[in-house]
């Protein structure tokens, strides 16, 4: 028998491959190695060891990389993620290993700073250019190129100054380490309330146990959940652990980050999708070697290689953006709990509108339930009411009802701000020809084109396909007959501008503020009162604080109700509570009005009455009757093919391969709600399982019986959230 190494590569492979270990090479699980894969030497990770008799065809490991290995806990986490979500181990490892260069130590760079005796001093007779250089380097030591640019001098000036003793040259790592957060810094300018202190202490006690626990931090919007979980973070830092705070991507704003900085005295390491490679490398390396103590990141930060994780916080745990829908399909909130378990760390799930799954776990005692029932100080909960659109019909071609217009008017007259919420980008969700009735449709996807006035284009929101807005109907060629139908944020903003000509109105959607920098900047403008009326999509919903915002108008409270989505009620309720919760966060009372055609809908009635408990029990009752989560488990299979008949045929074949098992019900195959996406025809199967069934194992065994032919795609979604 020969000892072999099992090596997993970050590519689409289901499991590790076997390799021979060269003489004298000492390997441990988690080590990084290069080994031949196909015709190349590729970076992989030693996943374990085994023994084999026939080693004839095995190749040798090429090189052992002398870097810190991945933790055993990380290997387990990759395995679990792959198993649970029925995906390939290699693809999960790829989420962990973003860049090879992160495994190398940071390269050194040369920096310039003034010598000590010159800090703040300016010798006489200095040229203007040299003076500018000292002004720049006084503030921060920097690389030659940066200094030259900031001081508008050529780099040769720096060399000459160094020679003359006016500057010092020194080397430092290109990626500087992150500052060490100080748990006792406490730079915020207010005191925590008694209730906040008590909640913070509850969480701290859990963190001090230094073992796996989950707490649901359940507090109304604006109750100070962030401040409270930062107390837990302080405790974890004091105990020497690393802290990961997951937030919805959009919440990674400057204002949001500022609170971490105020609490701990240094900026946390950040992780999000818009980061460049260099920044990613820096964070990865510093997290891996344990020096980055506090990381605030979007969902994928969960797959960073923490050396010693003490606490994971999932802020806005109900948020749909924790679900990754493409590639490796997983829910970061659920995986965070697993990661915490493997790391022996505390997990805090925070929300004003917890998911029914988390609430059920809290009620059954599996999770600790920490409650913040009120806003601090003078801040009160907004007053929420419904506007029945039957009684308050907006004018033809208009979308704001009288009561909402009055609400905005009042807020503006008091010098306060208003927000109009509509989760629809663009100008109009539908473009119809008045002459022939044609609706503009996406060429390769089953969806209507959305009119965007700002860019003058018609856009498919599912694929991003876009074309210039035609002047004539593509079908009957009539000029000027294409008409926008229904409102998008651009149209609501247009209406608001006509009603409030003096107001500073701004639209906030992914079209107007696509990148995080710009979002941060516009959020800051809103917070500081530079905007009077903000018209926004769901982008405005998440975790932002606008102290002067006192009125929120929800243009279409029905938007996601109706349809066949089983989570529609829950999601609508959560979104509207969050939107309404933007109002009245400081000492001014806030008000929210929700326009609706369904004033009797359970979710909306409960919302207006502030009756969360009522809403939850009605919703849970419905789920229990239908055997849906948390009373049962769900999975989906999505099949897609370029050809409709082939998609249907293969979907039937997949159904025939379903293993027989107790407690499983299979619905479909049926057409997926978006039947054609990017030219691919989509079919769906929905699998319902009783709570005691190991649904992942069932789906894996099903998957193993299916072989997708060329050009047909087959994906499993465990616990699907949406139904696209
Ligand atoms: P949540 O996350 O529960 O919505 P936040 O933590 O964002 O609430 O807090 C809402 C706002 O109230 C923030 O601007 C925060 O700085 C402020 N705040 C929180 N606690 C206090 C307090 N004890 N005194 C004054 N302001 C507070």
Image: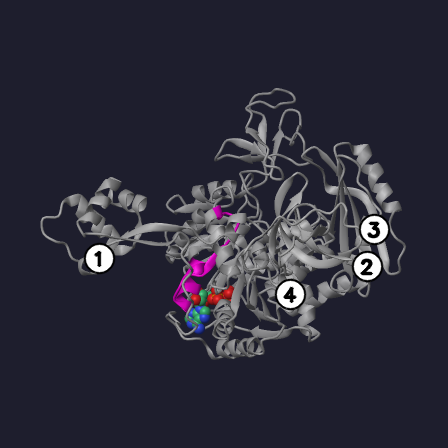
> Which is more N-terminal, label 4 or label 1?
1
Asked where in the image residue 25 lies, by quadrant, the reply is bottom right
Segment colored magenta: 255-277
Between circles 2 and 1, the one closer to the viewer is 1
Q: Earlier in the sequence, mark 2 or mark 1?
A: 1
Residue identified by numbered label 3: 702
Mark 4 and mark 3 lie on one chain; the one further toward the N terminus is: 4
User: Residue 125 appears at what percent x and percent y?
Assistant: 9, 48
Q: Which mark is residue 337?
A: 4
Residue that appears at 57% across and 48% down: 423
Q: Look at mark 1 in the image and give the residue it sits on.
A: 115
- Please provide percent x and percent y for residue 398: 54, 42
Q: Quadrant of the N terminus?
A: bottom right
Q: Residue at x 69, y 55 (%)?
A: 5
* In this view, 696 is above or below 616: above
Q: CA gap, disc 2 to disc 1?
A: 70 Å
Q: CA distance from mark 4 to mark 3?
A: 26 Å
Q: Residues within 10 Å of mark 3 (few under 14, many from 20)?
A: some
Residue 485: horizontal and vertical position, in percent? 59, 36
* Figure disc tally: 4
């Amino acid at each position: 028998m020969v000892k072999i190494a099992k090596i997993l590569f970050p590519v689409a492979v289901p499991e590790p491959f076997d390799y021979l270990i060269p003489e004298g090479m000492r390997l441990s699980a988690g080590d990084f190695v290069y080994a031949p894969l196909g015709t190349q030497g590729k970076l992989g990770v030693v996943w374990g060891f085994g023994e084999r008799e026939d080693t004839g065809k095995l190749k040798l490991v090429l090189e052992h990389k002398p870097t810190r290995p991945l933790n055993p806990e990380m290997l387990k986490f990759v395995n679990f993620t792959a198993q649970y979500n029925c995906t390939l181990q290699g693809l999960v490892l790829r989420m962990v290993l973003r860049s090879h260069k992160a495994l190398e130590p940071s390269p050194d760079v040369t920096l310039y700073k003034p010598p000590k005796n010159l800090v703040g001093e300016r010798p006489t007779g200095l040229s203007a250019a040299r003076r500018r250089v000292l002004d720049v380097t006084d503030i921060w030591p920097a690389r030659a190129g940066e200094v030259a640019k900031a001081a508008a001098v050529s780099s040769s000036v720096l060399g000459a100054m160094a020679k003359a003793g006016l500057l010092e040259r020194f080397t430092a790592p290109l990626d500087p380490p992150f500052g060490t957060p100080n748990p006792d810094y406490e730079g915020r300018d207010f005191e925590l309330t008694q209730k906040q202190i008590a909640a913070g202490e509850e969480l701290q006690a859990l963190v001090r146990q230094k073992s796996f626990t989950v707490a649901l931090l359940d507090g109304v919007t604006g109750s100070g959940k962030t401040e409270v979980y930062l107390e837990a973070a302080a405790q974890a830092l004091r105990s020497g652990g690393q802290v990961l705070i997951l937030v919805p991507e959009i919440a990674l704003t400057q204002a949001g980050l500022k609170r971490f900085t105020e609490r701990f005295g240094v900026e946390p390491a950040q992780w999000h999708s818009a980061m460049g490679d260099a920044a990613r490398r820096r964070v990865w390396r510093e997290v891996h070697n344990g020096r980055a103590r506090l990381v605030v990141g979007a969902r994928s930060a969960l797959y960073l290689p923490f050396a010693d994780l003490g606490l994971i916080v999932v802020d806005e745990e109900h948020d749909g953006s924790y679900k990754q829908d493409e590639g490796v399909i997983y829910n970061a909130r659920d995986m965070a709990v697993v990661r915490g378990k493997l790391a022996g760390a505390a997990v805090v799930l925070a929300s004003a509108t917890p998911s029914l799954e988390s609430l059920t776990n809290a009620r059954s005692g599996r999770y600790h339930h920490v409650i913040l029932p009120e806003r601090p100080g003078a801040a009160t909960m907004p007053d929420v009411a419904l506007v029945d659109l039957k009684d308050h019909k907006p004018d033809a071609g208009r979308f704001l009802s009288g009561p909402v217009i009055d609400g905005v008017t009042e807020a503006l007259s008091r010098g306060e701000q208003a927000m109009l919420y509509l989760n629809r980008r663009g100008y109009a969700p539908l473009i119809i020809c008045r002459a022939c009735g044609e609706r503009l449709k996406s060429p390769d996807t089953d969806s209507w084109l959305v009119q965007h006035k700002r860019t003058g284009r018609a856009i498919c929101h599912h694929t991003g396909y876009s074309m210039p807005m035609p002047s004539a109907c593509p079908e009957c060629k009539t000029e000027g007959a294409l008409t926008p139908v229904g409102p998008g944020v651009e149209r609501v903003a247009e209406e608001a501008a006509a009603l409030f000509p003096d107001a500073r109105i701004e639209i906030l959607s992914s079209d107007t503020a696509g990148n995080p920098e710009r979002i941060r900047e516009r959020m800051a403008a809103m917070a500081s009162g530079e905007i009077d009326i903000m018209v926004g999509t769901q982008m405005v919903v998440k975790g932002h604080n606008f102290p002067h915002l006192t009125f929120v108008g929800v243009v279409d409270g029905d938007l996601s109700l109706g349809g066949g989505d089983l989570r529609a009620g829950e999601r609508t309720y959560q979104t509207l509570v969050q939107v309404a919760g933007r109002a009245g966060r400081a000492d001014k009372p806030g008000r929210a009005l929700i326009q609706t055609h369904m004033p009797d809908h359970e979710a909306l009635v409960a919302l207006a009455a502030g009756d969360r408990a009522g809403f939850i029990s009605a919703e849970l009752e419905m789920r229990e009757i239908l055997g849906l989560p948390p009373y049962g488990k769900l999975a989906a299979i999505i099949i897609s093919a370029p050809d409709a008949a082939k998609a249907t045929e293969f979907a039937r074949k997949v159904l025939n391969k379903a293993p027989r098992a107790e407690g499983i019900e299979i619905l479909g195959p049926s057409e997926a709600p978006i039947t054609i996406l990017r030219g691919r025809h989509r079919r769906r199967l929905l699998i319902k399982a009783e709570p005691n069934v190991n649904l992942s194992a069932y789906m894996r065994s099903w998957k193993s019986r299916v072989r997708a032919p060329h050009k047909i795609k087959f994906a499993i979604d465990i616990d699907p959230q949406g139904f696209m």
